[in-house]
Image: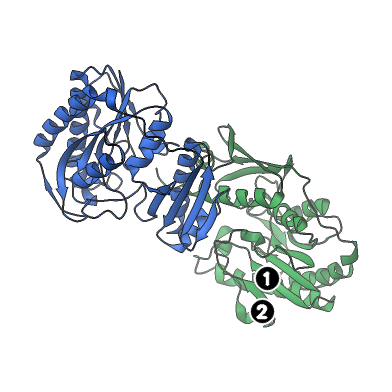
Amino acid sequence: MKLYVSSDMEGVAGVTSWQQVDARTPHPEYAIFRRYYTLEVRAAIDGAREAGVTDVLVNDSHGPMHNLLFDELPSDVRVVFGNRKPYSMAQDADGGFGGAFFVGYHGGAGDADAVLCHTYAPSVIYEARVNGILCSEATLNAGLLGYYGVPVLLVTGDRTTVDGVARQMPWVTGAIVKESIGSFAANSLSPAAARDAIFHAAREAVSRAKGAKPYVFTPPLALDVQLVTAAQADLVASIPSFERTGGRSVRFVHDEFPVLFRAFVAAWRMGGLAS
Amino acid sequence: MKLYVSCDMEGTAGVCSWRQCDPEDRDEYPIYRRYMTHEVRAAIDGAREGGATEFLVNDSHWSMRNLLWDELPSSVRVIAGAPKPHSMAEGLDGGSDGVFLTGYHAKSGARDGVLAHTFSDETVYRVTINGVECSEALLVGALAGANGIPVLLVTGDSTIVAETLRAFPWAVGVAVKESIGYYAANTLTPQAAQIAIRAGARDAMARVAAARPFAFAGPVEMRLETTGAQHADFIELMPGFERLDGRTVRFSADDYPTVYRAYVAAVRLAGAASAPA
């Protein structure tokens, strides 16, 4: 079985602040947590391999998307590395995968008790919905994977994130590495204990793959995005085929989920120009 | 008769560097901002002598809040600020009888065009509509034309004036300078330019009966070539855009205004690609 791994950083054990995940400045803390992040990905891969996974593709999905430390990964995985991928956190999902892992994921914009919660662009996206369903990053990425027939098998992160995914995709195995206390604090496992939990959850998740389903949004599809400010909506509404539905809201309607997903990427990138 | 004025800055007499046009510049910009305003005022004064009664001025340069209110007639309306969905052509959706383009400059890549560019100096290499390579003057003039409004006057360097008159032969052109490459010009003084623009504006009004709206026949296809592949990467994310090669995207629609708005959106999103990844 081929496994797809989308790895983010805010949901890694011990992470409670932007400095720890800030790859761009970068903050000295980042170097520490970058290693924990890589080792959580490795634990997930190791667990999956014990349950029969053969090929692994890891999509580095955090910040500038070149965070993983290659020396800490198995040498026989492929990595999608680097920024500005059209399908972003779900790039190259169409490769015939038997399942997907979401490692280090975090809560959606506005979630209570979710460390560093956001949906793609923290200062731009207030809320995103597809066909009325409130979407976290996990939801949107699962939708693209689902379009290609790939079910999500595992999610790791804080309890809010894991519970949120379980509500939308009850077949997903969860590894809860911390209990968030607001946006910037958590009661966390140690990184070592988190790796152990992720390893075992990954093995279980693959062994339960037969019961998993692709998460599919049924066309016609309507994407409703609420921006943080009206100035952002001014810009986003200028994207072809976008409709302004309110001071801070826009809508895009299309039958193909990949087109909708890319339109969402265009929307938050365009909205970011307002600041 | 109601007149619409889209005023840019690079085609103002004397302008030959970005510092003169950059609202962040504290030394040169305040001087040339005043000349820009006075050229707009000269165009309005001439048009009034030629029979225009009402004026809508769309500040179309950079931050789009360059015009000095105290130097304009108090009876005009001004569209100030950015971003605007139609950018340099905001407010051109009807109600005006003619268009003036003042302070305009040559298109991206033009030879002998001071500060020549097409919306973005940084990201736009070339834009064609139905195979015709477009300047800002042509893009804006075509939006006016789609709404039945003819271009009557264009002012700027001799390169953009000559090119614009080929597309809109009924218009009057006032060349305030001869560009010598991208950063130099043989120019009229601002005072002489204002006199020439006032006379040209009056003349343009006298020829209004012969003026025609310019329109691209539908279906309308835009091809946009960006300076780098990273810009096309972003533009391609938007619905309706097709990637033709590393630096080329295509967008088609039945009507030109939809294509024009897509162009504005494309240039904006391309700008986001210039930031560090």
Asked if residue B246 shows in the view, the reply is yes
Disc number placed over residue B44 in the picture, else none: none
A126 up-or-down from A48: above or below:
below
User: In the picture, residue A158 is in which quadrant?
Assistant: top left
* Horizontal relation, residue A202 to residue A245: left or right: left
Chain under label 2?
B
Q: Position of residue A230 (x, y in %)?
A: 46, 63
State the residue position of label 2: B72
State the residue position of label 1: B57
Rendered-image quadrant of the C terminus of chain A: bottom left
Q: Residue at x 59, y 72 (%)?
A: B31
Rendered-image quadrant of the N terminus of chain A: top left
Q: Position of residue B146 (x, y in %)?
A: 75, 55
Asked if residue B192 shows in the view, the reply is no
Chain under label 1?
B
Q: Residue at x 18, y 32 (%)?
A: A39
User: In the picture, residue B85 is in which quadrant?
Assistant: bottom right
Q: Position of residue B174 (x, y in %)?
A: 79, 63
- The amino acid type of the residue labelled 1 equals Val
Q: Would you call the spot at circle 2 few (<14 residues within 10 Å), some (14-19), or many (20 or more)?
A: some
- Mark 1 secondary-structure assignment: strand
* Gap in angstroms between the C-alphas marked 1 and 2: 10 Å
Q: Give chain A's shade.
A: blue
What's the coloring here? by chain
Answer with mark 1 or mark 2, whichever residue precedes in sequence. 1
- Mark 2 secondary-structure assignment: loop
Q: Give chain B's shade.
A: green
Q: Residue at x 30, y 37 (%)?
A: A169
Instruction: Give whichever of B195, A144 is nearer the camera.
Output: A144
* Horizontal relation, residue B241 to residue A164: left or right: right
Dots 1, 2 in contact, CB < 8 A: yes
